[in-house]
Amino acid sequence: MRKMAESMKITGIRADRKYDETDYRLLDLDDIFYINFIHQGKIKILTFHTIYGKYHPIATLEGFHVVLKDYGFSSLDTVNVVNMSKIKTVVESNVDIRVYFEDGTYTTVSRKKSALLKNYPRKIIDLG
């Protein structure tokens, strides 16, 4: 068994939400007493019972953005949360803006968020 000091973290959202950023927490395995399902009618909701109270797994990009922003992640579009340290290059065209990673995959960037990328290597291409 691994030592708890080496434990992974789980992202959680407070079961009794306050509807602000304090609802989200990065939970250490050390902080979890047990995990079970809470039943709401026919729906079973996975629940982490922790030293901070009850939390559910985060299932939204908004939630991941809140929890991970202090770890170098940013929302660059409505469809992603990006580890900014993993961006290799930015490609801008008249159609869209993309950030590429070392494995060749990419995700999109909204024009509004492109200012966050001013210090990254950039290529401009004309597709028109």
Image (cartoon, rainbow, N blue to C red):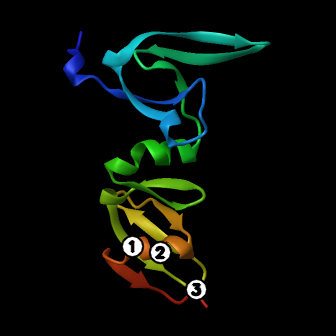
Mark 3: few/some/many CA within 10 Å (<14, 14-19, 20+): few
Determine whether the residue tagged by mark 1 lies in a helix, strand or loop. helix
**For residue 105, what is the image quadrant?**
bottom left
Amino acid beneath label 2: Ser
Mark 2 Cα-neighbour bin, 10 Å: few <14, some 14–19, many ≥20: some
Q: Give above or below for 103 relative to 16.
A: below
In the rendered image, residue 111, in percent from the top left (x then y), is placed at 55, 76
Asked if residue 97 lies left or right of residue 71, the reply is: right
* Residue that label 3 marks: 94
Pick whichever of labels 2 and 3 is earlier in the sequence.
Answer: 3
Q: What label does residue 114 carry, if any? A: 2
Task: Note whether 14 is above or below 2 in the view shown.
Answer: below
Q: According to the image, label 1 marks what residue?
A: 117
Residue under the point 49% across and 43% down: 64
Up the image or down, 34 lies above or below 91; here it is: above
Q: Spatial distance from mark 3 to mark 1, Cα to Cα?
A: 17 Å
Does the CB distance between marks 1 and 2 fall below 8 Å?
yes
Foreground: 82 or 107? 82
**Amino acid on which disc 3 is placed:** Asn
Residue 11: quarter of image: top left
* Quadrant (top left/top right/bottom left/bottom right) for the N terminus: top left
Q: Position of residue 38 (x, y in %)?
A: 64, 11
The local secondary structure at tag 2 comes to helix
Amino acid type shown at disc 1: Leu
**Residue sitting farthest toward the right:** 41
Total count of labels: 3
Query: From mark 1 to mark 2, how far is it between C-alphas?
Result: 5 Å
For the C terminus, give its image quadrant. Answer: bottom right
The spot of residue 28 in percent (x, y) is 34, 24
Residue at the location (36% across, 78% down)? 118
